[in-house]
Image (tube, helix red, strand yellow):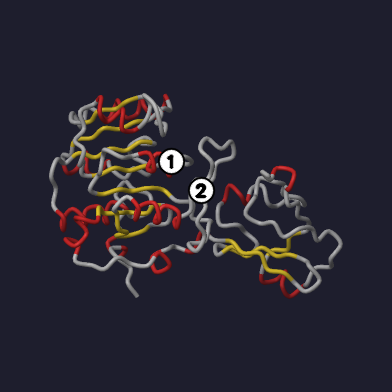
Amino acid sequence: MNTGLNSYKKTIFSQWGEDGIIEEIFKRIGETNRLCVEFGAGDGFECSNVWHLIKDRGWNALLMEPDEARYEKWMALKKEAPRLEVLKTAVAPEGDASLESILERNGAPRSLDLLSIDIDGDDYHIFKDMKAFKPRVLIIEHNPTIPPEDSIVQAYGEKEPFGASARANLDLAHEKGYSLAAMTHTNCIFVRSDEFAKLGIEEPGLEEVFDRSGLSYVVSAYNGSLYLRGLRGKGQPAFGWIYRGFRVSFFWSRIHAFAFGLAFKAKISATLARRYGAIVAFYSGKRHTQP
């Protein structure tokens, strides 16, 4: 099985081992302008894909963070990293707030070494709008609860965001001249195709590197009763924030991934209930479905 550079995962400040993968990529393709750009930058110490480069390797950085509290934490960190520039701004696909407009105003090179996109929503749309700038390495978040076979993207600015599937990110990356080097639980890591040969690997298949621990499954008995299988525990969806809303008799339209209808009156299988978690009642949320 070809797992790309997944074996180099190492967490220093990143969430899922991105630090080690990034380090290995630049060992192989080399550094040029040593500029990293990240928006949805967090607070530096938690889940940052770039703070290791900034703090420990002396990279220049341009970060964008609209949250006031997180912005102030980054400003405090500037004492440790004088080459760090922090902007208190959100990023949009178009207009003056577009990523490319912000990069232009701040003098970023078109072929910057690393771009990390992590805003829990419109990541795909930001990437899609990029035309002039071609980062050598690109990290973009995907929704790990969507199977790798499915290509789906939220509408821009959708009120109940879910981001994009890994398949959708991969298809867009291929269109834009990128190849997949590695994947963590929530991030696809791409290298520009004209640099990819320097890695000395073949591009892995998405299914080979996708972390399936974020997936949940609905199992059905023949009478229509439903059971939830999450890979992290009996009857527990993959993400804890879903689980907090799950242990009630009904979970409503907030969970759009499952649309198997109703099984209010079906008797529960004791065998399946021991293995999985029985769903007592289920509402499909059709009233919220777009035509």
Q: How many marks?
A: 2
Residue drawn at the location 44% of the way across and 51% of the way down = 142
Of residues 244 and 140, the one drawn nearer to the viewer in this rendering: 140
Q: Helix, strand or loop at disc 2?
A: loop
* Residue that mark 2 sits on: 153
Q: Amino acid at mark 2?
A: Val
Looking at the rendered image, the quarter that the C terminus falls into is: top right
Quarter where residue 69 is shown: top left
Q: Position of residue 244 (x, y in %)?
A: 64, 48
Q: Residue 247: which numbered mark, if any? A: none
Element class at badge 1: helix
From the viewer's perspective, is residue 42 above or below residue 264? above
In this figure, which residue is indicated by the disc labeled 1?
A: 125
Q: Is residue 77 left or right of residue 94?
A: left
Residue 281 visible in the snapshot: yes
First reached walking from the N terminus: tag 1 or tag 2: 1
User: 279 or 275, which lies in front?
Assistant: 279
Q: Residue at x 43, y 39 (%)?
A: 119
